[in-house]
Image: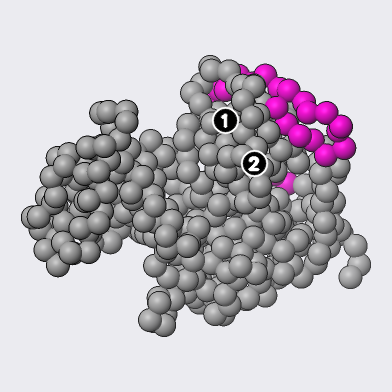
Amino acid sequence: MSKPIKIILIAFVAVVLVVCSFGGGLVAGRFIPGLQPVLAAPSAGTPAVSGGQGGTPADLQSLFVPFWQAWTIIHQQYLDQPVDNTKLMEGAINGMMQSLGDPHSTYMDPQTYKDATTELQGSYAGIGAYVDTNGTLLTITKPIANSPAEKAGIQAGDQIIAIDGQDVTSLPPEAVRQKVLGPEGTKVTLTVQRPGETTPLNFDITRATIVIPSVSSKMLDNNIAYVQITTFGESTASDLHKQLGDLMAKNPKGIILDLRDNGGGYLETAISVISEFVPSGVAVIEKAGNGTETPYDVQKGGLATDSKIPMIVLVNAYSASASEITAGTLQDYGRAKLLGVTTYGKGTVQNWVPLSDNQGAVRITIARWLTAKGRSIDKKGLTPDIVVNMTADDIKAGKDPQLDAAVKQFTSPQ
């Protein structure tokens, strides 16, 4: 069996509609010792009696008698035979994870797990839009620049009510999101409900491969360095270090770090990003269920640790997990002021554990994380030092009042 990947900082908002079946959230890679599966399905109608990977462990046989009774009844009495044993197995695991009542502890089927683990490599196939799966309807939060979604006319605030002519308003947003996704070159028709419009709008979109660099940067007017991080992926730390080197060589008078719409990523990447701006100390603390706290320290060699260079971090309601750790720790140390609106509030740690025989994975909450100074932001988020809103109308008009306000912090007398 594969080793489980230790996952932290998973956000279930601002999910990118670009991979084929990505189940939501981003990952943080760190490996821990393997776990064994609880049970494996026996042949139809045959109760499991052996221990270990071949069936129900001996000490759980009595507990699982009703499960195997239900399994047998399905195979013996269900109208449409034969039933799909794989779907039964996946459904059982999914139901077990849902019974925990934790939205971050879930089952990922094989395709979802495959797509999820490639999410941070920076190349995707789909329509190219960030979405919110947290409400009643799947809602577009922002189309990706130059993506098929943007070119077709999809806008922030659009709510998807039908796909290829089929009503999806009764489906969970995550199920709708997966229906939108698909391979490069395939077409999908989205019917959306748009604020201010009295009738639904239809958009024909051809899915494409979308490449999203996790780090982009430039020098703004007035010698201000601007860095945007869209996800905390595999190459983010090295890309940031290189680009910061170029920016710092120009002696900027201030730095703007844009973490808006950043749903999270690798724990190690978050520590590396923090380390570029903080010279020493704790980067993040992991708190286990028994109260044990494990601190992770800042790494040496950061390029922008000089506190004489002021810094603003842009955040919004879709800044989550790794981006919240980064923003919160920079705020803790007084290295940066946060500007924008309250962040999402994702403060738990997950393990992603691959299951046997390539049968997907389970993700399960194992701990909470805290900022450097011990703050928990779970379910409450980070409060910006400077509150500046940005509306859907601003986005539609190409305006960015939050970035404008950040620039003003460096250019106007305080």
User: With respect to residue 57, does 126 lie above or below?
Assistant: above
Q: How is the image coloured?
A: one colour
For the point 85% across and 44% down, which residue is it?
A: 394
| Residue 409 on image: x %, y % | 83, 62
**Where residue 289 sits: x, y (%)?**
40, 77
- Which residue type does callout 1 highlight? Val
Q: Could one spot residue 384 in this view of the protein?
A: yes
Task: Check if mark 1's residue and mark 2's residue have beta carbons within 8 Å.
Answer: yes
Within 10 Å of the Cα at label 1, are there few (<14), some (14-19), or many (20+) other Cα atoms?
many
Task: Say which mark, if any, is on residue 220.
Answer: none
Residue appearing at x 39%, y 52% in the figure: 95
Helix, strand or loop status at disc 1: helix
Left or right: residue 255 compared with residue 302: right
98 sits left or right of 55 in the view: right
Task: Read off the magenta span.
Answer: 191-219
Q: Amino acid at mark 2?
A: Leu
Residue holding disc 1: 180
- In the rendered image, residue 199 lying in the magenta stretch gets the answer yes
The residue shown at (70%, 27%) is 191
The residue where tag 2 is placed is: 138
Q: Is residue 304 visible?
A: no
Outermost bottom residue: 291
